Amino acid sequence: MDRKELFISYRREPETLQFVSRLIHDLEQSGFSVWLDTRDIQPGGDWHGAIGIGLTKCRAIIPVMTKDYLNSRHCVNELYTADGDRKHIFPIFLEDIDLNATEAGQGIKYVVSSVNWTMCRQGVDDYNMSISKLVNAMKLKGLGADGTETAAGENASATIQPSTMTTPTPVIGPITTMPFKVIRDVESPDGITTSKQGHLIVSSMSGQKVLIFNPKHEKVSEIGGEVGLGMGHFISPSGVAVDKDGNLFVVSHYFIQKFNIDGDFLGQAGGTDPKGFQIDAPRGIAIDKNGRIYIVEQKKNRIMVINSDLSFCKTFTDGDPLLGSGHLNMPQSIAINSSGSVYVADMMNNCIQVFDENGNFQFRFGKMGTGPGSTTAPSAVAIDSKDNAYVASVATVSIFDSKGSFLHSFGEYGNEVGKFSQIRALHIDQDGVLYIGEWVSNRIQLFNTLQEDVNTREELKRVPMPNHRCNERSVMTSHTVQDSPKKDEITFTNVTSTPSNQKGYVRTINEITDVRSISISRNGHVVISSGSEGKLSTYNKAYELISDKVVPGLNMCVTTINQDDILLAASVCKICKFDMQLNEIMSIKTNDIKGWTNPFGIALGIKGRLYAAAVDKSIILNDDLTYYKIFAEKCKPFSIAVNSSGLVYLPDIAVHAIHVFSSEGEPLFTFGGPGRPPVPQFSLLGPLSIAIDQDDNIYVGVAMKSLNIFSQEGKFLSVLTSSGKKPGQLDDTPTALCIDQSHRILLFAEKNASRVQVFKLK
């Protein structure tokens, strides 16, 4: 067994596993070697002995503290052993815990009382900041890539970039990594299914209920809502499925229950009587072509099969979960393909195991890791009409063919639209719509899967778009959840314009990642904000780095520069002004600014006003940075720009359009989206970044790895450059744009490329 620096001690619960998988990815990216039981113990190995060896050889232990951790004798013993061996201890708390409440807690408090804790509570603490602090603390103890002791405060600074798991342009799967629709306020969706008539059914585990939506995705009824044993009540409802006759089946602790699509109770099976069959800790369910129901039993590590009349049929994969292939270890989800093969998401084995309809093991695929084909702690699996398997792993969806060969993956961690936070449910309906349910964000994102290779096809068909047809003056008042797009089949044509300005490529600024914004001063100096910690970097006219600086409180900041060459940087916590040497002139806290939230872009307009783009409500500040007005409610912009006349342009990623406002924030008109120009309409698919030149032409970076140019009225003009990996080409979505008005220089950054490219405009 190779020596590893860090030993991860954790309780095997699904939520904790998701966190641990993300943590390991980020620690290894930061240069640490990590020991993990499910990865470093071979099938059939001595589990307890291997854990003891792993603890002995490691230099530090990271206990992932939850209330369940205190109840695990094995976890507590691991911590005590590490303390007795004088290992470094770096506890991470995922929730608030009263360590005085139990005897085990008091013992743990004694062990960890002398060390600093890392708080990483969902919805309370910023993950990236917390883990960055943890990394710095460990490096100060001599842990890390070089393993040398570092004096406190010397070269120990480290930052964690937001976890991402992305791959190149898909050849299968969603036509874009942005959803065409988002259904919000769905409490902890754990199971998703649809009926032939288009009804959407979602189980809410924490809400103890099942939600039923009509084909327009409007909630029409719900079942349950209070904890109870059967007869329309649930204890942690999870899997849901609809049979060919339209009957709805729901599994929860002890029971499987049957309803009609209106939610009327029809029957149940299972129960607490040991003489009958009991369903223990069920997760996903699936129904085969013969109407038999397959239920995943998480704690018993097996699959239970029930006949269509709710009588018991059989179980399979019973046995020791450590025996390897054909034996499950905390299974989560199940799906059945057209030939009857059964696919099971096996969380602790980090793979998908495949069985025939009789329960005989066929093969397995997937692995732990972060690269292509990885299925770390898979939480859900779904099958499309071509028998491709979609697998959810942490914040990524990976796609495999029916034999387990990797095809493509997409997704990254985050709460923004198009990103994922703790995926718990996948479903693909008869129209090829992929539903992705997330616990942390309490939402379901919808993607289209029915398309061909976007690299070779001349036309893109069956791309549903939100049915957004409100008039110009009310464009901002429609709800995020639009009418069902399935019936809107729009044919698009690829942009055929020759890249008009690729010869304008000047140079590339390399080795800069996670760019948030780019600003240019009148004398040609460039300021780039990057990273979650709010790093500001200044470059001269030759694009040579002059200085960089991290300002506390400016996490994930965005910037702009006024006519006096004063740099404004804004974050959720404060707004600062700097000179071009990054000397701070002033700063204000944003606590007292009405409506202020996390800005995704800022721009200066007439009267010195500052316009800040944010999800669901953008804001206008006066020149003295006091509140003026909220505008663009229900809009989803990730950037903002103001033209020479004071018109404000907001790219709306939710409806694939640009909304235009007056300087007072009044809506004027919209271009893009279904039924509106420009043509070709793909030129505004997933608009993420925007900039305006001195002629008021609009440059928009879109999800199709393209940078497209429009007139101020919204007429499509041309494409700036082509996609590709070469200098002067786009390797990914342009996420930050800036145009120097004096020298007509355009700079842009790409989503997953560590560079900023410079173009000279005509």
Image (spheres, grey):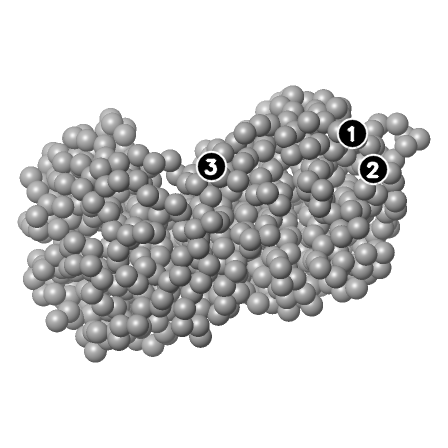
Q: Is 250 situated left or right of 386 in this image?
A: right
Number of numbered discs on residues: 3
| Residue 483 in picture, x, y percent from top left | 43, 41
| Residue 518 in picture, x, y percent from top left | 23, 56
Q: Which residue is drawn at 78% across and 29% down?
A: 267
Residue situated in front as seen by the camera: 252 or 498: 498
Q: What is the three-letter code of the residue carrying label 3?
A: Arg
- Label 2 sits on residue: 310
Task: Say if 250 sits above or below 42 in the image.
Answer: above
Q: Do the residues labelled 2 and 1 touch (CB within 8 Å)?
A: yes
Task: Say if 542 sits above or below 734 in the image.
Answer: below
Q: Which of marks 1 and 3 is nearer the N terminus?
A: 3
Task: Say if 487 sits above or below 470 in the image.
Answer: below
Q: Which residue is drawn at 76% across and 65% down?
A: 363
- Label 1 sits on residue: 267
| Outermost residue to the right | 275
Foreground label between 1 and 3: 1
| Residue 300 in picture, x, y percent from top left | 81, 43
Q: What is the three-letter code of the residue carrying label 2?
A: Leu
Residue 184's disc number: 3
User: Cα distance, mark 3 to mark 2?
Assistant: 34 Å
Q: Earlier in the sequence, mark 3 or mark 2?
A: 3
Callout 3 environment at 10 Å: few (<14), some (14 to 19), or many (20+)?
Answer: few
| Residue 134 in picture, x, y percent from top left | 48, 46
